[in-house]
Image: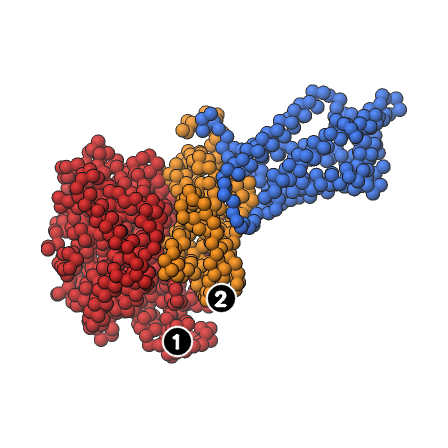
Amino acid sequence: MKVPDARIPEGPIEEKWQRCRDRLDLVSPANRRRMRVIVVGTGLAGSSAAASLGELGYSVDCFCIQDSPRRAHSVAAQGGINAAKNYRNDGDSVYRLFRETIKGGDFRSREANVYRLAELSARIIDQCVAQGVPFAREYGGLLANRSFGGVQVSRTFYARGATGQQLLLGAYGALNRQIGVGRVEMHPRTEVLDLVVSDGRAQGVIVRDLVSGRISAYAADAVVLATGGYGNVFYLSTNGRVSNATAIWRAYKRGAGFANPSFTQIHPTCIPPSGGSQSKLTLMSESLRNDGRIWVPKAPNDRRPPDRIPEAERDYFLERMYPSFGNLVPRDIASRALKRMCDEGRGVGPNGLGVYLDLGDALRQLGAEAILERYGNLLEMYRRITGENPMEQPMRIYPAMHYVMGGLWVDYHLMSTIPGLFVLGEANFSDHGANRLGASALMQGLADGYFLLPYTIGDYLSRKKSGCLSPDAPPFRDALRDAETRLAKLLGLRGTKTPSEYHQELGGLLWRHCGMERNADGLRASIEKIRELRESFWKNAQLVGRGDSYNVALESAGRVADFLELGELLCLDALSREESCGCHFREEYQTPEGECLRDDRRFAHVAVWFFRGEAEAPERAVEPLRFESLEPVARSYK
Amino acid sequence: MTERNAISTIGLKILMGITGFILVGYVSLHMLGNWQVFLPAVYINQYAYLLKSIPLVLWTVRLVLFVAFVVHIWSAIRLAQLRRSARPVPYDQRKPNGASWESRSMLLTGIGLGLFVVFHLYQFTWHLPPFSAFEGFTARLSETSRSVPDVHRMMVEGLRNLWVAGAYLLGMGCLFFHVRHGIDGLFSSLGLVNRRSFPWERWLAHALGWVFFLGFSIIPVAIALGWVR
Amino acid sequence: MRVILRIWRQPFPEERGGFVEYVRENVRPDMSFLEMLDELNHDLELEGKEPIAFEHDCREGICGSCSLMINGRPHGPGRATTSCQVYMRSFRDGEQITVEPFRTKAFPVIKDLVVDRSAFDRILQAGGYISVGTGQAPEANTIPVPHDVAEEAFDAAHCIGCGACVATCINSAAVLFVGAKARHLGLLPQGKLEQDLRVLRMVRAMDREGFGACSFTRACEAVCPKEISVEVISALNRAYWLARTKEFLGWRKPIA
């Protein structure tokens, strides 16, 4: 297998996107109505794409598994969205955002893509403001900004602690308008079970109506997957509970390349796990690190309450280790540092899994009112979950699985290795390399949906000579049968363990061996263990209920079955990448100070995995990364 | 009827509010008039005579009140139907969740008030049995003028009966709760509520409720205690 | 701790439902209410019984999926909370807890505790947006928005569309939800232009869905997870009658 050409235009980096756009073929307005596009997922990327395609005049079918498009998990993003507006006159620019994103991603992303993202960032803010997103404002009525991890300028736009919600509601509004005028047909509570590929193109999808249980086929001229990340493979994560990898995993098994699956981001500022039957981890926006100082006691096993530990006996370890960025180092670095503190026995809280995030100094300097205006809802959420008041005592935080940089491989046009299959947002392998900077996910999702896909999909559609297949055509019948067989197999499981138990075991395994620190032995053992788990699942799992009605157990069993396959690919990728970069930290490859040791000679590439059959090992292909504008250097935040 | 011309739920509430406002206005004037019972009898008798002396004004006012009353009740019936049909399966358990008793009991207090009005008209306007005797109460406004109905005596005799006085107090209780929430809702329906940090409409509603309740109730109480005779 | 759950079970929309009692022992106070239900479901599955269907997703109180009526209060005990953010420490040991779906004609039950809230989507599809196409937007700072206006718009825009307001309302009125959207967009200069159209369309869509009329009991405000103020209802009423008057007098084109 070879990775297809990424179709990156020639020319200086500043002109690549313009050149690409100028050469894209167009579909005439009269023909657009006859073209059908399927959009799966209604987060920032999906909603914005479906709305924009509807506005252009395409006939769009949009699917989401939630009861309403507004509930997609983009809604939970808290901190903000980056844009190179330089409103603060602090030296920001498109180039700087580009450079910081590449550096933040530890030189494992495509220059051209990232530059384009930085370029488009400003227009996203314009669009959202026009849609009525109530961004924070200065008293003069102009937009406010704050700084965010891994960055020395203030370029993050925010709407209190619910930026994701507000941006999503903006895109949802645009989508609603198109649904209202009949350009987009919305199918809520509908899950995609498979992708239909024939004649070397994506032809449509097989879906299951989650209420009636009915399985049906939808044909289209192009399929857009915007189904988010697969962080839930770790079982405990900050993702929504229904976020899953089924759509992209099915696409992978139908031939789409899966890029850098092991690039999974662990977020430093989450509420520590409480153990037991905990169902999910809760993120506290990284923006808290602007005003909060992170520390642990200097002595291990210091069990005194925080207010009894004098200043001299506190270790503000991020400020000590990374003097120039301090508490604002990127997420991967902060998470690893936190983990190491806890491993040294200096962790705080009930199980020693946690460090303090202290707003004390900020409270003294800025006053309670300013802090509440900035973080009110976050602090309230923390108080509710832990029963502790962060205005009185420091918060405890611990890293948690949060975001995946890996995903389906896409070219410069956001098209996967299957022609006609486009992948947006977190679901694609994206522009974040080996580590994403804070407030960049929202930017990427919206850039993909509003300003990239609507152009590039037209180019594909204009070249497509044949119409779309009938949903009764043989490829659909075959795929329908496959999906039905698989569901029947799941419904026939009569073992003794629930799918959720398998999911927890898988998650635990990945967290330990494919989490913040990885090594070859652990990964090899995990791969073996995951294979056993998978085998056991299809023998010993247990499922109740029927397929022809609302059945949550069936839904989650199917997702867990896919996670059990994906987990192995995660470990395979982590094992084969014999270097440390960004979030991917292999214990064997580190500097004497314990930082990432990259191997640009061997691994300055995107690893793209191809499915070769159930019994075969997947094939690893590479897309080399060429750096023309930036010189890959060792990342330092010291 | 097209959807546009049908009355929306908000339209119904506005109708309810405006007719309620007319009725509240009338009740205010009525209370001020009633207070003349504390003056010598001639004042209230003269006032009553004045009110009835110009038939055009009298009947216009009566017509407006009647229409307001009917529309108010019709809206209430529509709203009650809407409420019923909007929740066909009731909850097994439900808490008020911050909703005041009066706000949840507008229908009850409204029915109570409606019955009271009918009784009030029955007794003091139509003078039907067993109150037919009121027909014969007359007085002279001055030595020379002709005789007019003796409203003062009618009130005193009518309210001296403790059962009647009790019914009046009950009616005023309904008025109290109905107005307390009704005024509050009126301002909301008309879109005049701005800041919950300064709930002036609530204060006004509560104050008016108390003024009506005390202002009306003082009369039967005073009569029962023999202050007015 | 120990709790006795009375949970509404209804296998299909058209079938009659009823309460089923479950006793849960060894419930930890730091467990969330939904995690307690997860455990119950796990045990039910192991017994070969169908788990209880309830909606949830983000479990941090922002997606608006969860929709449980717990002991007669939408989302259960506590101010400004969603069902997913209720912790077992809010209940007494040995307490009986009744869990029902949100009930109103506009939210038909799908299964057990899951209801269909697509009526809300249809209201917003009728006009809950600013009509701006992708690419049409002017530079973001072209139109300043006063700080306090932006903050107030945010307060209204924070609505998560969970339906608690409707669930608790004695009239099943949806005006807090509709008002929040009308207020959010109507306050901002970008949204003012089409406010009349928006309000008329949304109110008509709301009436079509069979929600009741508001009698201003303020229960909606008291249970709203995002503490949306009843001010938005008043603002909606004001905007509605202004727009309706203009339409009635022929000052603007009638809206279909």
Q: How is the image coloured?
A: by chain
Tell me residue A132's x, y (percent). Answer: 38, 43
Q: Is mark 2 on a helix, strand or loop?
A: loop
Is B11 above or below relative to A149?
above
Neighbour tally class for label 1: few under 14, some 14-19, many 20 plus, Cα within 10 Å: many
Task: Report which quarter residue A558 is drawn in.
Answer: bottom left
Q: Which amino acid does label 1 sit on?
A: Pro
Instruction: Identify the secondary structure beneath mark 1.
Output: strand
Report in which chain the residue with disc 1 lies.
Answer: A
* Residue type, mark 2 in image: Met
Tell me the red chain.
A
Q: Which of A369 and A74 is in front in this view?
A: A74
Q: Name the residue under label 2.
A: C1
Residue lying at 39% horizontally and 37% vertically, measured from the top left? C127
Colour blue belongs to chain: B
**Disc 1 marks which residue?**
A297
Chain C visual colour: orange
- Label 1 and label 2: CA atoms lie apart by 34 Å
Q: Is residue A292 visible?
A: yes
Q: Position of residue C6 (x, y in %)?
A: 49, 55
Dot 2 surroundings within 10 Å: few (below 14), some, or many (20 or more)?
A: some
Q: In this view, does C70 lie to the left or right of A1?
A: right
Q: Nearer the viewer, mark 1 or mark 2?
A: 2
